[in-house]
Image: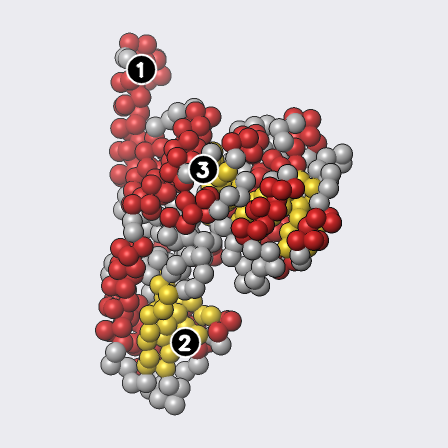
Amino acid sequence: MPKRRTILKSLASTLPLGVIGTRRAEAAESEAATDAGRDYFGELGLKPFINAAGAYSAFGGARMRPEVVAAMRYAATNKVKMNELHDAVGARIAALAGSQAAMVTSGATASMVVGTAACMTLGDEEKMRQLPDATGMKHEVIIQKKHRYTYDRALTVPGARLVEVESEQEVRDVAGDSTAMMFFLQPTQKGDNIPADRYVKLAAELGIPSFCDAATTTPPAMNVVDGVAGGFDLICYSGGKGLRGPYSAGLLLGRQDLIGFARRHAAPSDISIGRGMKVAAEEYLGMLVALETGLRISEADDFRYKQDRFDNITSIVSNVPGIVTKTIVSEGHANELYLDIDWDTDVINISRTEFVQALRDHNPSVEVRAMMFSAGRIQLSATVMAEGEDVMVGEIIRDVLLAYT
């Protein structure tokens, strides 16, 4: 009897390549379908939770839209050359956002790394190989003192040094032959000494590339278009939060030349500082579809969906004595809807901290926003909640609070 390997080899030599590819794909889909009912988290001993807190990184970001999931599934089983995919997706995203060029990165932080490296080396291959040793090249990044924050460490990964300023005159004083970039954070809780429009003009006047971290300024997705229109040479966004794309992806948009340099600092380039910050084909396609879909959904429609979730919760908890609920809209660049929940502690004898823990310990577990900067106020987000989960959240909140009346 012929060996199985011999038979397969014979078939491969006679079947058209298209048929072979199709049958391989069908086999993979069949195997995936067989595992569709598996409880993977349960097998790992993990406890799922209902996310009523929002699209935080610690909670896995936002729930991807169905269109994004479908696009990523398609890319996982249909292969094209990565550079060609990068070119095509980048061109489409740039057209959607009104930018000269765009690229998908492995997150907003990665965008900051490769964007800074691009401004430091400007395509010089010898300098690219030298990073993070910045000897002999432009390596200073000007940043407003009020814009210092946790993630500005990403700017130093390629070897840059941060130079703090507090006024336009200080920018002029420190700008020189060593200046690679001027950085801007949007939004900042500490305010701006130099507002965005003036910062962009100042950078252009001095001939220094300007970079804006706008990672958290969505939703709505239209803020990407508005951000690009702000005139920064480079601007980045997180993909897995307000845009509801892949959690481990982001966008970098801006000048054609700088995006080209930034691409050379990312995989699959083997001389890049960002070689380990790989982006899978699924993420390229997922980010494109996330932006396409997000731009088709109006802010009014998005708010309507979230308000419906909050209305269901409010209706369920309305019979709890002493409870107060209010829908609020966040102030800032990202427009989000939240449900604020409070209660009379003379009627319901539980602190906010105890309440948060009680929800966390419940089965199913629920996570909410505990606003540390607002006296620990409790707020709910519907960004990650699916239909039906709102009802469960309402019932759990009602039962927890009634237990302490």
Residue type highlighted by circle 3: Ser
In front of the other: 58 or 339: 339
Residue type highlighted by circle 2: Phe
Could you say whether the residue bearing mark 1 is in a helix, strand or loop?
helix
Q: Is residue 358 visible?
A: yes
- The quadrant of the rendering that contains the N terminus is top left
In front of the other: 276 or 272: 272
Where is 186 relative to 32, above or below?
Answer: below
Mark 1 or mark 2, earlier in chain: 1
Mark 3 or mark 1, earlier in chain: 1
- Expressed as whole percent of the image width and height from the top left, the position of residue 70 reads 30, 39
How far is disc 1 from disc 2 in space, using C-alphas? 60 Å
Residue that lies at the very extreme toward the bottom in this rendered image: 346
Instruction: For label 1, count other residues whose C-alpha is less than 10 Å away and answer few (under 14), some (14-19) or many (20+).
Output: few
Residue underneath mark 1: 17
Q: How is the image coloured?
A: secondary structure
Residue at 49 percent across and 50 percent down: it is: 215
Q: Is residue 275 visible?
A: no
Instruction: For label 2, count other residues whose C-alpha is less than 10 Å away and answer few (under 14), some (14-19) or many (20+).
Output: some
Is 120 placed left or right of 3 in the picture? right
- Expressed as whole percent of the image width and height from the top left, the position of residue 288 reads 38, 38
- Expressed as whole percent of the image width and height from the top left, the position of residue 170 reads 71, 53
Q: Nearer the viewer, mark 2 or mark 3?
A: 3
How far is disc 3 from disc 1 in space, using C-alphas? 39 Å
Query: Mark 1 near mark 2, Cβ–Cβ under 8 Å?
Result: no
Where is 283 relative to 371, above or below?
Answer: above
Residue underneath mark 3: 99
Q: Nearer the viewer, mark 3 or mark 1?
A: 3
Residue underneath mark 2: 355
Could you say whether the residue bearing mark 2 is in a helix, strand or loop?
helix
